[in-house]
Structures are given as C-alpha cells and as structure tokens.
Image (cartoon, grey):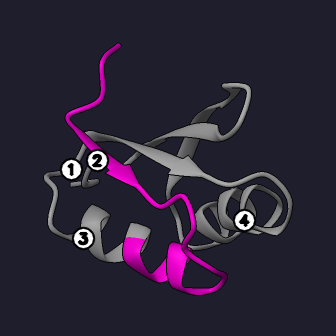
Amino acid sequence: MNPDRKLDLRGTPCPMNFVRTKLQLEQMNAGQRLEVWLDPGEPVEQVPDSLVMAGYTVEKVEDRDDFFALLVQKPTLVA
C-alpha cells in the first residue's frame, strides 16, 4: 500500500530523526501511513525500535542502496 506522506530525513542525526518522524505522525490521521527515509547505521537501528515503543506499527524496512525506507502506520483509535 502506498504511503499517505513521505518524510526525507537523510542527513538528520539521532535523536532528531525520531522526533521529526513522531511530530509528522502526530499530524496524520489514525490508520495513515508515513514513509520515512533514513541513513544507514544508527538512524535505521534506533528509529524503528523507538517508534514501536511509542506505539506505532513499523510495517516495512526496505534497503534502497544508499538509504533505508520505513513504512510506519499511525495506530487506529480503539473505541
């Protein structure tokens, strides 16, 4: 499924890449997906785990040669 929004955070250091991802997700509707582009190394090692701990669903981590693309879903509200 295609993302609802994309966020290019290549070149953004930790923990700012997590903070910016979380701020973007907070502006989105429940159930929407965000594609986040991250550098290899610490960003792709830290951000997915931090998002899961914050309650988001990381659906996919894709290696795209010189960067990684995460597909993150904002949780749907439970009634």
Residue at horizontal 52 percent and vertical 85 percent from the top:
16
**Residue 31, percent across and down?**
26, 40
In-front residue for pair 66/73: 66
The disc, 4 or 2, on the residue closer to the chain's N-terminal end is 4
The disc, 4 or 3, on the residue closer to the chain's N-terminal end is 3
Helix, strand or loop at mark 2: loop
Helix, strand or loop at mark 4: helix
Give above or below for 55 relative to 15: above
Please give the label number shown on residue 30: 1
| Label 1 close to label 2 by CB (< 8 Å) | yes
* Residue 21 visible in the picture: yes
The answer to which quarter of the image holds residue 66 is top right
Residue at horizontal 54 percent and vertical 75 percent from the top:
18
The answer to which quarter of the image holds residue 73 is top left
Amino acid beneath label 4:
Pro
Query: For mark 2, what is the residue?
Result: 76
**Residue 71, percent across and down?**
49, 36
